[in-house]
């Protein structure tokens, strides 16, 4: 497992059909008629910059509600409170309850809307503390769109609906900018969530508002709307660490969108059909350097746990037809990639396919990392925070960052730039290089490598509904549920601050 201590980086530059909003002061939306009245996407940010100071480390788990009746109908919900959970949604919430049963949460904040509150009630069942409703956790306000079927939105609003689909950050309706208002509301929510005295907090809300909570905690602008996917009952985990001398906390996204169902299931990504996908598969755990005498950690083979992890990953990916595997030339990555390839090519024998599959497997030198990161003696955060920019470790980190640019481009080159072709590419390597690739996907600078976390044996899924020339959609990061009894729990007990 690669432990990455988060550091504060610089920001990337870059009911009925219409239900009324709740009347409480905390629920008031900002009405604006010009871009300048709310923070624009170009405003400088860094992870944690908009968050209040903390006295202790805190973990926050965000869960989206289960499937609702309007989800099933394909109706635009927004902040309307006319839909309820379907039987499938209730079952999803129960799965989430079982998944989080052993976690010692100190509090649960929830949206007051029925679909979210019911999900929270199911997950929170058997716990003593009362739910904490917060009207700012309601779903995005979509005004005249609310209650319409999606095809009705296209027919009635034409160009305006297309703007909502293609340029949501600048979308305006009824004198409002919904996404910008949502981002402002998410920052307000963080003030209350982080002010709670508990060290472990559960938040049950909605798709768009959970996206906004993740993005604003990391200092990301409204341009990241629909980039950080939130599925029904998907769980995302954020760790907040106080600064030694006060100030804004550092933030690490421990995992994103851990769903009750498989993260590689085919279909849409955030409501958009996608046929092109990159999967970042972290190699399994290796023997320690003390057990390896062949010239460095790059020669370390998988240990028994790593062998199990690689097989579990191969079994998970059997649900997909993988076209190509690019892997680091280091032994553990090659062994993990070989396991995936062998299971793919045996798909007909395993009953997953009617014909054998052919998978192209090749080494990619740019996925190789230095032994200093294999040994995990220092986290990226410690290297960056040391201030010794000219130091050897920082130079090695810069070299890893530079090669990640070429590695990311090599992966994109594997995806055809046409709408018809399906393509699934798997990249296998150490968590360190995959952290850099996630940042490359999101157009974030090197400092953001410490704002994400990946475990050995985990997978992260990136979809390209608009093709490889546009920014990818992060479907999930650090997914480990496929590892079964050998997996890292969705959340860990937070007995002391050092665990962050």
Image: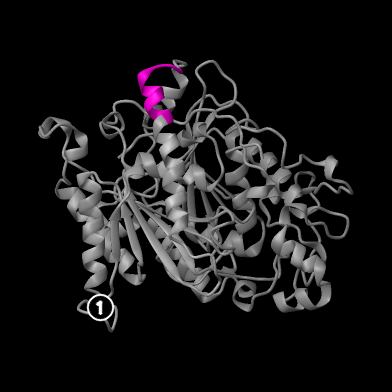
> Along the horizontal axis of the image, is 18 left or right of 277?
right
Q: Is residue 392 magenta?
A: yes
Which secondary structure dominates the residues rendered in magenta?
helix
Query: Where does the N terminus fall, quadrant-wise?
Result: top left
Residue 446 horizontal/vertical position (percent)? 50, 33
Q: Establish if 34 lies above or below 310.
A: above
> Along the horizontal axis of the image, is 233 left or right of 157?
left
Q: Viewer-proximal residue, 190 or 13?
A: 13
Residue 157 horizontal/vertical position (percent)? 82, 72
Point out the stretch of residues depicted in magenta.
389-398
x 23%, y 44%: residue? 330
Total residue callouts:
1
Q: Is residue 367 visible?
A: yes
Q: Establish if 36 lies above or below 73.
A: above
Quadrant hosting residue 270:
bottom right
- Judging by the rendered image, the residue that carries numbered circle 1 is 356
Residue 10 horizontal/vertical position (percent)? 59, 30
Quadrant hosting residue 17:
bottom right
Q: Is residue 382 magenta?
A: no
x 72%, y 42%: residue? 41
Query: Where does the C terminus fall, quadrant-wise?
Result: top left
Q: Is residue 125 visible?
A: no
Quadrant hosting residue 146:
bottom right
> Along the horizontal axis of the image, is 311 left or right of 489?
left
Secondary structure of the residue carrying tag 1 is: loop
How dense is the environment of label 1, judged by Cα within 10 Å: few (below 14), some, or many (20 and up)?
A: some
Q: Viewer-proximal residue, 462 or 222?
A: 462
Instruction: Tell me the colour scheme of the image.
Output: one colour
Residue 217 horizontal/vertical position (percent)? 59, 39
Q: Viewer-proximal residue, 130 or 382?
A: 382
């Amino acid at each position: 497992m690669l432990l990455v201590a988060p550091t504060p980086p610089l920001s990337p530059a870059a009911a009925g059909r219409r239900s009324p909003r709740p009347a409480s002061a905390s629920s008031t939306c900002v009405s604006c008629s010009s871009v300048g009245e709310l923070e624009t996407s170009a405003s400088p940010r860094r992870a944690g910059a908009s968050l209040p100071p903390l006295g202790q480390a805190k973990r926050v788990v965000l869960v989206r509600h289960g499937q609702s009746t309007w989800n099933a109908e394909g109706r635009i919900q927004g902040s309307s409170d006319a839909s309820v959970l379907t039987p499938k949604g209730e079952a999803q919430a129960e799965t989430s309850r079982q998944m989080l049963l052993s976690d010692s949460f100190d509090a649960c904040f929830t949206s007051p809307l029925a679909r979210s509150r019911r999900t929270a009630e199911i997950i929170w069942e058997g716990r003593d503390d009362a739910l904490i409703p917060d009207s700012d956790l309601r779903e995005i306000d979509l005004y005249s769109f609310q209650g319409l079927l999606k095809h009705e939105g296209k027919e009635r609003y034409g160009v305006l609906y297309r703007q909502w689909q293609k340029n949501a950050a600048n979308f305006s309706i009824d004198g409002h900018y919904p996404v910008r208002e949502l981002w402002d509301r998410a920052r307000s929510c963080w003030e209350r969530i982080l002010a709670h005295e508990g060290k472990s907090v559960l938040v049950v809300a909605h798709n768009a508002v959970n996206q906004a909570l993740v993005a604003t905690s990391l200092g990301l602008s409204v341009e990241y709307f629909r980039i950080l996917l939130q599925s029904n009952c998907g769980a995302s985990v954020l760790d907040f660490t106080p600064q030694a001398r006060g100030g804004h906390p550092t933030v690490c996204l421990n995992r994103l969108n851990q769903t009750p169902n498989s993260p590689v299931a085919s279909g849409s990504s955030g409501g958009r059909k996608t046929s092109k996908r990159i999967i970042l598969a972290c190699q399994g755990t290796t023997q320690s350097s003390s057990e390896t005498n062949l010239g460095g950690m790059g020669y370390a083979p998988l240990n028994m746990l790593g062998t199990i992890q690689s097989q579990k990953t191969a079994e998970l990916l059997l649900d997909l037809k993988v076209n190509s595997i690019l892997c680091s030339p280091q032994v553990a990555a090659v062994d993990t990639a070989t396991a995936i390839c062998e299971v793919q090519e045996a798909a007909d024998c395993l009953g997953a396919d009617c014909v054998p599959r052919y998978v192209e497997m090749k080494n990619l030198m740019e996925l190789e990392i230095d032994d200093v990161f294999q040994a995990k003696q220092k986290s990226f955060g410690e290297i960056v925070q040391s201030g010794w920019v000219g130091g050897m470790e920082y130079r090695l980190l810069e070299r890893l960052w530079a090669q990640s640019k070429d590695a990311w481009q090599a992966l994109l080159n594997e995806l055809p730039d046409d709408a018809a072709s399906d393509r699934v590419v798997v990249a296998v390597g150490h968590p360190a290089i995959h952290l850099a690739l996630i940042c490359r996907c999101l157009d974030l600078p090197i400092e953001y490598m410490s704002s994400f976390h990946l475990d050995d044996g985990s997978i992260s899924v990136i979809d390209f509904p608009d093709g490889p020339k546009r920014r990818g959609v992060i479907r999930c990061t650090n997914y480990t549920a496929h590892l079964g009894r050998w997996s890292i729990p969705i959340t860990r007990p937070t007995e002391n601050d050092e665990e962050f």
